[in-house]
Amino acid sequence: MKRLSALLLACVGALLVACPNPASAPKHGAAAAADPTESGQPQPKLPTLKLWLGAHEVITEIARTPIEHQVGMMWRTNMAELEGMIFIFEDADRRAFWMRNTIVPLDIAYIAPDGALLEVHAARPRDETTLPSESERVQFVLEMRQGWFQRNNVKPGMVVRTEKGSLQETFFRRR
C-alpha cells in the first residue's frame, strides 16, 4: 500500500511539474522569444484613425487583435501629446488593464458601445496592478498620455467619435 501511495504521489508530482501555470512560469529560450510582451521591443506602429473627444482631435493607433491588445504600448519610450491607442473589443464587458512593461505614464479611459466615456484611470509605468473598469459596458479602451483628459477637460459622459462617425459605425459597420 505504501508503495502504491508513493507511486501515485510521484505521478501527481510529475503532472504538476509538466503543467505549470503559464502566467507565473518564467519564460526562457524559444518561449520567451515567442511571447511579444517579453521581447523588449515595441510592436510596430499600428494603423491610425482620428478621434474626437468633444472638440479635441487626437490620432490613435488601432489595436484590434488579441496580440495587439496584449502588447499595446509596451516598450514604447515616448508618446506625443495628441497620440493614443484605442483597443477595440467585439462586445461590451468589464475590462481591466495594467502597465506591465509600459514605460510611458498613461491614462486609461473605458468607453461604452455608444462611444460615451465612462471612466478614466491614471496608470503608473510598469505597475502590474490591474485597473478594472467599474462598468460592465466597456467595448473600447483609449490610452492617452497621463493627464491628457484632465488638461483638456474631457470627462465621463462625453462621446468619442471618429472621422467615419460613431465608434460602432467605424468598427462594426455591416458590410
Image (cartoon, rainbow, N blue to C red):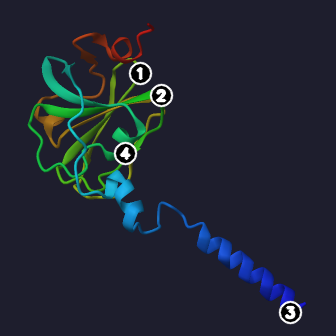
Between circles 3 and 2, the one closer to the viewer is 3
Whether tag 1 and tag 3 are in contact, CB under 8 A, the answer is: no
User: Whole-Å distance between the Cαs marked 2 and 4?
Assistant: 18 Å
Which residue is label 3 attached to? 2
Image quarter of the C terminus: top left
Where disc 4 sits, the SS reads helix
In the picture as drawn, the residue positioned furthest to the top comes out as 175
Q: Earlier in the sequence, mark 1 or mark 3?
A: 3
Report how far apart the C-alphas of labels 3 and 4 lie in the structure: 48 Å
Q: Which residue is mark 2?
A: 92
Report x, y in % for residue 101: 27, 56
The percent coordinates of residue 142 (x first, y second) are 28, 33
Bin the neighbour count of mark 4 within 10 Å (Cα to Cα): few under 14, some 14-19, many 20 and up.
some
Measured from the top left, where is residue 112 in percent x and y?
Answer: 39, 25
Mark before the other along the chain sequence, 2 or 4: 4
| Mark 1: amino acid | Pro
The kind of residue tagged 2 is Ala
